[in-house]
Image: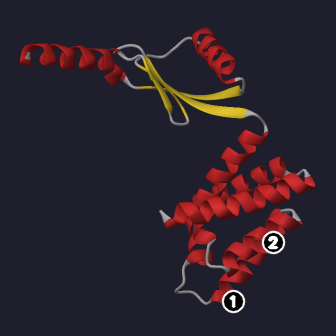
Amino acid sequence: MISLRIARRYAKALMAIGKEDGQAETYKEELGGFVKLLEEQKEFEQAISNPLYDAAGRKRVLQAVVERSGLSRVMASFLFLLFDKGRIQYLGDIYDFYEKLTDELANIVRADLVSATDLAEETIEKIRAALAQKTGKEVKMDVSVDPGLVGGAVTKIGDLVLDGSVRTQLKTLKESLQRSEVI
């Protein structure tokens, strides 16, 4: 829980800088690229975050990679700040929060659509358009398939869940029948 508070705090601080200098989207791309590098290169991630290694050596490794990657001055300073404060291990969570903040800034909402079978692209577009109309925002959707739904679909936008799955309808019907037997 504390890691989420830390991540939120640093993401908000970076967003404040991004809003001020108009580079919020650039910082998102740079931060995302660096997080991806850490995920792909586990040895590098260990080299900069493992406290068993000498801090000065870890910082030199980070500095060498930052210099070669061509990151902006602000992003480089941000990464060194995280390193100096012992927060570099929260970079993935910071990126997740920062991505949400940039979406809010761009009036974008993310939605997850889970269906029982593959949906036609035109069906997905209709759902996206309906959600955009309801929210008044551009909707970016992550679509996946879960055969366990039996039929229908479940859409999640933030805390709002629109469950139109057959599985849930059957569960509701079962509970209703059980309640009527009790009476």
The image quarter in which residue 141 lies:
top right
Total numbered badges shown on the rendered structure: 2
Instruction: Give the residue at the far right of this rendering.
Output: 21
In x, y percent, where is residue 175?
20, 20
Q: Which residue is tagged 1?
A: 56
Color theme of the render:
secondary structure
- Looking at marks 1 and 2 on the same chain, the residue that comes earlier in the sequence is marked by 1
- The front one of 70 and 1 is 1
In the shown orientation, is residue 122 left or right of residue 147?
right
Give the numbered dot on residue 77: 2
Q: Which element carries disc 1, helix, strand or loop?
A: helix
The image quarter in which residue 66 lies:
bottom right
Q: Amino acid at mark 2?
A: Ser
- What residue appears at the point 75 percent right and 34 percent down from the top-left corner? 107
In the shown orientation, is residue 115 left or right of residue 11?
left
Q: Amino acid at mark 1?
A: Ala
